[in-house]
Image: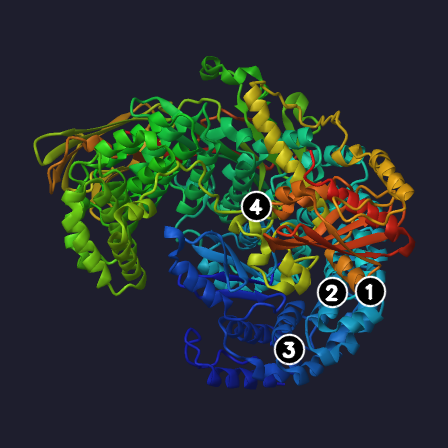
Amino acid sequence: MISQFFVLSQRGDNIVFRDYRGEVPKGSAEIFFRKVKFWKEDEAEEAPPVFNVDGVNYIHVKVAGLLFVATTRVNVSPSLVLELLQRIARVIKDYLGVLNEESLRKNFVLVYELLDEVIDFGYPQTTSTEVLKSYIFNEPIMVDAARLPPLGPAAMFMQGAKRMPGTAVTKSVVANEPGGRKREEIFVDIIEKISVTFSSSGYILTSEIDGTIQMKSYLTGNPEIRLALNEDLSIGRNGSSIYDYHSSSGGGTVVLDDCNFHESVHLDSFDIDRTLTLIPPDGEFAVMNYRMTQEFKPPFRINALIEEAGPLKAEVLLKIRADFSPSVTANTITVQMPVPSYTARASFELEAGAVGQTTDFKEGSKRLEWCLKKIVGGAEHTLRAKLTFSQESHGNTTKEAGPVNMNFTIPMYNASRLQVRYLQIAKKSKTYNPYRWVRYVTQANSYVARL
Amino acid sequence: MAPPIPAPKTPSPSQPSGKSEVTDLKLQLRQLAGSRAPGADDSKRDLFKRVISYMTVGIDVSSAFSEMVMCSATSDIVLKKMCYLYVGNYARCNPDLALLTINFLQKDCRDEDPMIRGLALRSLCSLRVPNLVEYLVAPLGAGLKDGSPYVRMVAALGVLKLYHISAAMCLDSDFPATLKSLMLSDPDAQVVANCLHSLQEIWNLEASKSEEASREIEALYSKPVVFFLLNKIKDFSEWAQCLVLDVVSKYIPGDNNEIFDIMNFLEDRLQHANGAVVLATIKVFLHLTMSMTDVHQQVYERIKAPLLTLVGAGSPEQSYAVLCHLHLLVMRAPMLFSSDYKHFYCQFSEPSFVKKLKLEMLTAIANESNTYEIVTELCEYARNIDIPIARESIRAVGKIALQQYDVNAIVDRLLQFLEMEKDYVTAETLVLVKDLLRKYPQWSHDCIAVVGNISSKNVQEPKAKAALIWMLGEYSQDMLDAPYILESLIENWDDEHAPEVRLHLLTAAMKCFFKRPPETQKALGAALAAGLADTHQDVHDRALFYYRLVQYDVTVAEHVVNPPKQAVSVFADTQSSEIKDRIFDEFNTLSVVYQKPSYMFTDKEHRGPFEFSEDLASLSVGAQSAENVISAQRYQENDNDLLLSTSEKEENGSSAHYGSVPSAYSAPQALTEAALIDHGSSAFTSQPAFAIDDLLGLGVPDAPAPAPAPPTLNLNTKPALDPGTFQRKWGQLGITLSQELSLSPQGVVGLTTPQSLIRHMQGHSIQCIASGGQSPNYKFFFFAQKEGSSVFFLVECIINTSSAKVHLKIKAEDGSAAEPFSALFQLALLKFGLP
């Protein structure tokens, strides 16, 4: 049971504030913001999502640079409140198309309208965009999406693949297009976050994929949809194939450790032909989340080396190789490497003809940072750096540097090889042929190579 | 009337100073109030928006109340909604003005549009003005019978709102009864859910005052209601499902078949994408299977995968909440997770509060099979640039060393940390090496060799410095230059700011002196002199004490300051098992995140369904869950069994296979413990003794034990009574019996914690509802129920272990059964501590 709900900007201004039960004093938003901003407990610098000040529990999530906060005095389920906050953010996004401070400020009356229906007296009522439609009367005021910095995982499609309509993902589920009629379309995004740790000798120590199949439907009349996945997909670690790593690299079966599904998904035929049947509700939602620890081919190989070159000098060599097809291009790649704390200066040497690459030595955190705009599959890139130390090293520079951490996004690539074989929409008429977009993307969650 | 007014030339709304803007708004609103001109509504909308935006940023716009109400006569629903929001916000502080709104809200409650009816009713109930409640009753009554589910849904929570404004009015109008029948009959799932919300909250708040409320709560958690809700579970929204699952977790099933039915039925909820639904389901599973060790373990195996998936999916905040629950389970049964250690490796980008949880989990699950990997991983973190995490990782390595069998390799790693020559690494490591030496003195040789090389100048942190000084004193015979290092430290006495370090210096100087007197004499003299002059009271006192001790007799002083030591076998756990159990009972609540039971962070009035009174609460040191005392007790015991049996299985080397096909929970072979109690035999064994006493015509003998009358009473093995009811009954009933008796010597020995007795009495179908106290005085409140009837027995039992005296006060609902019950109780008590 929630007492208050509010949304704060990064500077701590109230954008929306709704008091449902009147049990928590009005100044709670200020107390919360001061606590989060100057968090200094338990040696940690960042406030946890849930904390208690004077008997009031503050529960918050960060979405699009905004703080969505709920307060309560009751010993509630933290998951329930956090899920609810996240869902409120999503519903608002469904309505406004874009979720950010500006759109929220412009539409705060609509947001109040939503909040009245989503929560009553602190108890969640409904978070279904579909159901809410019948209760909401304000028209969203659109903000210009084009000049906004892209946010969220869906935004990455705007830069990479040209055939995607970039504005679609920022379209409100209720507003009509300027032209008049709504465009019939449906988006299915397979988003994978991968975590890999390489040992100093290049072996994979741990690897995991956390994936989600996200859907956003703009179809009228709620037609039924069939989503077919790999026929040989197997779930659970009880299959014996799980330890048979060799067969997996050559187009073998995809083995998921576990997965879960959205409420609307019917699994009647899932066991037989790996097909999900659902009537997609309006708005964005995760059809399925899955987790995989089966070994997969990591998209990048990292080679890092640090060698002493004289009493106060060392040389760093960083090499990355893209182990995927040349038809795929990774973008916004960042490689970071912590260097010994007594490093005073660093000079860089990029490979000949390097385009769209920048380097930096972060003095404060003592890291080398190497950014690449894009890497085409199969390509290899190298960076050399010369370090100057302020004191003599003790012959163990390797121990005091690293690990190398990499961030990237690869559109139209998925490491797990989980696929949507087809997306079938129940036809209403012969002419009914909505646009279907099936998109894949892989992101680094934690991609680390030790020295 | 007036045409729409163009935007006024007021100062920028981004810096509203308050007064002038509000006056301006009032003026404009007044002009628009009666306007029917086209476009008037649009202008009103703009003005209303401005009012609401002022309200949001905290500017008081309550002075525009009457103007807002005047403008609210409109058919524009957007305007209406804004007006409702405004009225709801200010009505409580302006009760007189609120009266103005009653009229139009009541009218709207009769509107033909169900949406308007619902909205008006919601606003009407949200006014929170006590003297307006009389206007609420009629619209609420109508709302509950409304044809539209939307209105009924609003009305169901409206009853709760009314209850909070005026409980008497709500109860007198008999609304709870209406809600109850609505809950069991309404076709709309959200109406049902809202009825349940309201009923739960109302009855829980009433429970301490009326017996009826307790009965109503029992009825809510009874089989018909629980099964009714379960059968409908798929109709509910995911949030309402969480509510239903919470109710199910409070239900105590009649037999094992019921448990399996419920679990098989809820099995697919574990695959839900909403983490809250999954955790609520897990709570049901864990609580249901508490008394079935094997199945309980299977549940752990079953829930692992969904939990890990939830940790990976969703936002960082959501995965943190799930990880906290995983942490709780891992700490409870680390054995069951020992092969999953890789899932708890820290990821580069994770915030430190997540990493900390993971480090604790890694520490807990380290065993022979995975220690090498885990420690290797932790050593990587020790080099981390995130210093707090690096420190935490070193501590984790130390903890593993303290709990491990193969310390050898780990000690080497720790000593390698010292070679890293980072101050904070050295500091953490020194503290750990000190602890290790206290547990494994045999390692002193290797450790001292390395520690001796550390320059004390590089150690600045008080804790680390104290540890180093302790080692210098303790092992001064093995460290050549110990006296000289101590001497130089003593020379800088005045620069030493931490009293902790100065205290250690005094003691170390003494120890060193006993072993190498000629070299240390001068240093000790200097230390004692400095200590005597010290401004810190403790330091001064210790110096004075040592000084007099040495003056009195050096050998005696050595006995006092440096006696032969025993290695420490186990370092005390920071959290008692009672607290941990209580947190476990509060699974899927904030308690798990805070790692504290709810009574430590919530006010009394928000503590939850069942509250302890001051009297009981002060006693309940943590043995009971505030939510469900009886089941909690039952669980605790069996849960310990679970852990025990796992470790035994490990030792036997039998690789236990738990059903990997999770939906097929098979009924366990063993009967539940409660079912094994044989009342007949206990009655039988006591009979001969009684017969003899009777033959001899003696009264009740004083020693060794009073012979109780033959129990002709059978007790219910699973009685249910919540603290509120207990307390009320205790207050209502007079004392039926009051007795003094002696506890057997074995019983006295066995009573080290209240828990042991509680568990013992449970075996005799006597449940504890609250306990407390410290040796030698313990106080317990027990209860039991006559088999097949509703008759309860309540017992206050005060035990003094030093005199072995027990004082009993028994209150029975059926006076005639008090004697046999007392006999049964005494018999059970006397058996305590006997093998």
Task: Determine whether the residue tagged by mark 3 lies in a helix, strand or loop.
Answer: loop
The answer to whether residue B628 is above or below residue A315 is below
> Disc 2 to disc 4, how far (Cα)?
34 Å
Q: Quadrant of residue A342?
A: top left
Residue at 43 percent across and 61 percent down: it is A35
Residue hosting label 2: B160
Dot 1 and dot 2 residues touching (CB under 8 Å):
no
Amino acid type, mark 1: Gln
- Percent across and percent down for residue B353 are 43, 47
Q: Quadrant of the C terminus of chain B?
A: top right
| Chain bearing mark 4 | B
Q: Which numbered marker is on residue B580?
A: 4
| Chain bearing mark 3 | B
Can you see residue A427? no
Amino acid type, mark 2: Leu
Disc 1: CA contacts within 10 A as few (<14), some (14-19) or many (>=20): few
Q: Of label 2 and label 3, which has the lower sequence position?
A: 3
Q: Of label 2 and label 4, which has the lower sequence position?
A: 2
* Mark 1 vs mark 2: in front: 1
Circles 2 and 4 on the same subunit: yes
Residue hosting label 1: B732
Residue at 45 percent across and 34 percent down: it is B362
Task: Determine whether the residue tagged by mark 4 lies in a helix, strand or loop.
Answer: helix
Residue at 33 percent across and 36 percent down: it is B437
